[in-house]
Image (cartoon, rainbow, N blue to C red):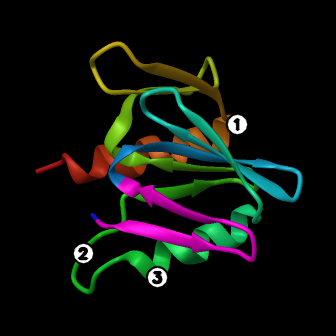
Amino acid sequence: MAKICLNSRDELILIDLDRIAFFQANGNYTQLTYISGQKQLLTIGLSKIENILKASIQPGQKGVFVRLGRSLIINKRFIITISVPKQKLYLGDYDNHLFGIAVPKTLLKALKDEIAGTFQN
């Protein structure tokens, strides 16, 4: 996957999508979290990030980012565990980086069913 470029009046930000764990809404801004733990506050909203991510998908490819509710976009490549009863989604790289994110049960159940369906024969 390629990098995306966010260009504003005052700054230019290059984002390597392969290293993004998740985007989380923070008011009118978006908190970007890399799998390494590095965080960056973006001065655009989550809906605009979602549109940029959709536009970055090459024809014939599936997107790896999925929106969960109003405040979260995750990278499906980093999913380790989906715990519906605990309302937790764990993202990690099987190294030293693990993030536990609280997500409503209904969203986790739908995500779990979608992912489990891709592994069914």
In x, y percent, where is residue 73? 58, 52
Say left or right for 85 vs 118. right
Q: Name the residue under label 2.
A: 61
Q: Mark 3 points at which residue?
A: 55
Q: Residue furthest right?
A: 27
On the image, which quarter does residue 45 sit in? Answer: bottom right
Rendered residue at 27%/64% (across/down): 1
Dot 2 crowding, Cα within 10 Å, few <14, some 14–19, many 20+: few
* Disc 1 residue type (three-letter): Pro
Q: Which of marks 1 and 2 is in front?
A: 2
Look at the numbered disc 1 and give the secondary structure of its residue.
Answer: loop
Q: What stretch is highlighted in magenta?
A: 2-17
Which of marks 3 and 1 precedes in the sequence?
3
Of the pair 73 and 83, the residue shown nearer to us: 73
Which of marks 2 and 1 precedes in the sequence?
2
Q: Name the residue under label 1.
A: 104
